[in-house]
Image (cartoon, helix red, strand yellow):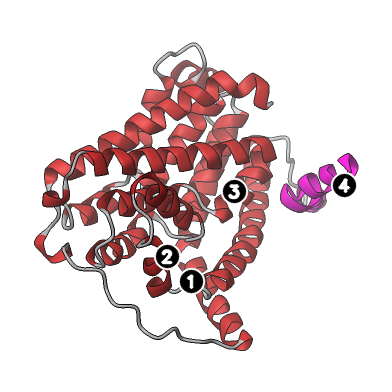
Amino acid sequence: MDAIGSFLLDQVLKMQWLSGLLASALSAAGVDTSSPVGASLHFFIYDTVKIVILLTVMIFIISYVQSYFPPERSRKIMGRFRGIGGNVVGALLGTVTPFCSCSSIPIFIGFTRAGLPLGVTFSFLISSPMVDLGSLVLIMSIFGPSIAVVYTVVGLVVAIVGGAVIQRLGMENQLAPFVHGDLAEEGAPVEMSRRERLSMAASETRSTFLKVFPYVLVGVGIGALIHNWIPQDLIELMLGGNNPFAVVLATVVGAPIYADTFGAIPIAEALYLKGVGLGTVLAFMMSVTTLSLPSLTMLSRVVKPKLLVVFVGVCIVGMMASGYLFNALQPMLG
């Protein structure tokens, strides 16, 4: 069983066969893969191809599963829960929605207009861009299964606690007037054939891929730059374990950057390979995917400043706490 697990991790998820194949091809073309230029080229091609393959497969599977849970059905399911149970359901629903932070906001508006509790909708809003099945697979392909599972659990906890805190503060009056609404009546479910579900999944995969691919290229390019051109001493000075504020710095620096998980992971991988602490890297990735200037600008049209500040504050505190927790657990996680 260990041999099978190692094979699946190394050859299926990490695609080490692809790394070796590209190294051989580049060497045959006269490229020295040990030089900064050659290593950057290898990193860029390898990570791009690997992420694209995993991305398209996972988005197709997730989209097919989602065809059984249209927004009306999701609202009906979530409307049955209150309190912490509602926050758990909202956070879990976010894990099966492959949306970036900006794409999650229209769904958040729909849930809120449908009369769902504010804390439940915010648990969804936090979880959706931060934790999803696609990112779980990609994180597993880089950091291994134990770290990927713990990251997912911690991300869900941040979403659940964040939504519960916002619900506890009773900030329903901090929503824009057009967002208020009552729970919509459930319409007749739309039945789809298997062919229609497959067609919808293919369409969603194509649409999502076209949206995120530019960010994948940018993320992989930045990752190649960090991995092969920025001195390790400089990165360790700023984000290494000797800097007690490394997690804080990574969270604050990551917040303004707009990228989804698939664009953030190559940067996180390069930082990790340079010796940056696991918690610092994952806090940066959480911040990049959940808090960005475009998404916060969109959200500011939906909620009033007080609620926006609370949302950002809750997320940042949760991310920093997660970062320090991961750094402390890193020796055990490997």
> Which residue is denoted by mark 3 in the rendering?
136
> Which residue is denoted by mark 1 in the rendering?
69
State the CA–CA distance, disc 4 to disc 2.
Answer: 38 Å
Question: Can you see residue 252?
Answer: no
Above or below, 235 relative to 36: above
Q: Which residues are magenta?
A: 1-26
Marked residue nearer the N-terminal end (2 or 3): 2
Marked residue nearer the N-terminal end (4 or 3): 4
State the CA–CA distance, disc 4 to disc 3.
Answer: 20 Å
> Does residue 153 appear left or right of residue 7 in this picture?
left
> Which residue is denoted by mark 4 in the rendering?
4
Quadrant showing the N terminus: top right
Q: Nearer the viewer, mark 1 or mark 4?
A: 1
Q: Residue at x 50, y 36 (%)?
A: 154
State the CA–CA distance, disc 1 to disc 4.
Answer: 33 Å
Residue 310 location in percent, x, y? 22, 38
Q: Main secondary structure of the magenta part?
A: helix
Callout 4–callout 2 Cβ contact below 8 Å: no
Label 1: few (<14), some (14–19) or many (≥20) C-alpha neighbours in 10 Å? some
